[in-house]
Image (cartoon, grey):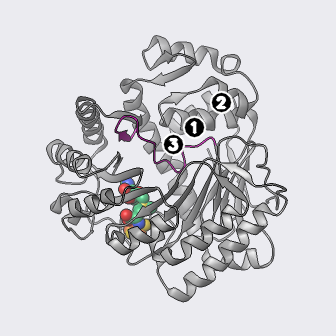
Amino acid sequence: MLLTSLLRIALTRSLKPFVFEGKYQNKLEFEDLEDLGLYVHIPFCRSLCSFCPYCKEIHDARRAEAYKAALLKEIELVTKDLKVPKRVTSLYFGGGTPALMIDDLKEIIGSLEGHFTIEGGIGVELHPTDITEENLRKLTEAGVTMVSLGIQSFNRSCLEKLGRRWEPFEEKVRLVRDHGFEVIDVDLIFAIPGQTDVTLSEDIRTAFANGATQVSTYPFIDFTFADNAYKPMPEKVKKRMLKNLAADCRERKLDRTSVWTFAKGGTEKYSSVTRDTFLGFGVSATSLLKDIFKINTFSIDGYISRVNEGSLPTSLTLNFTKRQRAAYFLFWSAYALKIDPEKFRRIVGAPLDSMYQMEMAIAESLSFLTRKGNTYELTDKAAAIYHHIEQVYTTAYIDRMWNISRKQAFPDRIVLK
Ligand SMILES: C[S@@+](CC[C@H](N)C(=O)[O-])C[C@H]1O[C@@H](n2cnc3c(N)ncnc32)[C@H](O)[C@@H]1O
Ligand code: SF4
């Protein structure tokens, strides 16, 4: 808590906490934003994994049908004032398990395409059980070009510690590769009890050998509302594992594309939230615009009744001060290991140098940053520190926010210090 407070105060140069209010606007300003991404949340799973913090419930066909109708209404509400289709970079479906609504994805994509021109790809998260010949064909037909596979580990004992069923997933990754998707991300978790640097390195090797273009390696986080039979290994071990896996990926000539992602050179990234601005649809989806960050309700019933009343299903809104917007931009740029001063100026409305000259100079002198042309890149040394900061924020901010949102459909306000 102390670390998050100090960093917030340092970056925003203010004691003002982040205040999320229950009040909201029924119109979102996004027409003029460049580099806008789209995200759609599908909150249904076949069974619920004990470690997973995301907003989801057990799939039920009738509830999914009602949810789809509400999703289509939310799209209409958000876009009602658009005169011409808005250009967007990408569209991602996450969850939950989006493939449980695979026959609805085409209709949802069609509805979004009525209002947006999707210039980059369309991505979908897949649980290993979803990886079948028929599903992959349906995804291709619906225009999906990027997939993210929730493998977690190829190692039987590690996977069982997470409470997930083991199968020879190598065959599944190869099946995806043979369908010709442009981007194939494999999600792995590290610091699972019993996991070693060797088994983790083997997992990364297996992912790439069977067709992954990117691997996301997330440190195992024990959310306060999770029900983990086995707890993550301590932070000291996480730090060592990340250092070794980063060195391992460097040796394999992979690019480090964020603190926790590694990709084959020349491939596109699978990244649903590391965008400058995005619009999110569905329960728990967030939207990041020029001056606001907003979160939709986590309650499916609350979501359906709000959109049926003709209102946006927003539960909480943060109206950024200039310094807070700048801090938010820097936080996610640092996660992606790249700070682009031109983008900073466009989004924050002031030059990076004028707001953080001293901090940038100190970071450069400590070898946390290097200059590449007009941008700054974070070094592995900075990434190691950032790995820790990101987890502290996840616990202090995301865990707290999601825990409240799981219990209250429309909280009055949440203050994050
Ligand atoms: C929405 S989830 C999973 C998508 C899909 N339903 C699945 O299970 O394969 C996205 C990713 O978050 C990561 N994740 C979920 N809970 C986590 C935790 N407690 N710690 C670290 N990573 C986690 C996993 O790697 C997971 O694949
Ligand atoms: S990890 Fe995936 S399948 Fe498991 S509960 Fe979370 S979203 Fe559902």
Q: Which mark is residue 343?
A: 2
Q: Is residue 144 visible?
A: yes
Label annotation for residue 5? 1
| 379 over 102 or under it: above or below | above
Q: Position of residue 108 (x, y in %)?
A: 61, 70
What main secondary structure does the magenta stretch of the protein show? loop
> How many numbered marks are there?
3
Q: Is the C-beta separation of discs 1 and 3 under 8 Å?
A: yes
* Residue type at tag 3: Met
Which stretch is magenta? 259-276
Ligand 1 image-quadrant field: bottom left
On screen, residue 113 versus residue 163, left or right, reads: right
Residue drawn at point x = 49 percent, y = 85 percent: 60
Along the line of sight, which residue is nearer the eye, 412 or 24?
Answer: 24
* Residue at screen point 40% across, 72% down: 135
Question: For mark 3, what is the residue?
Answer: 1
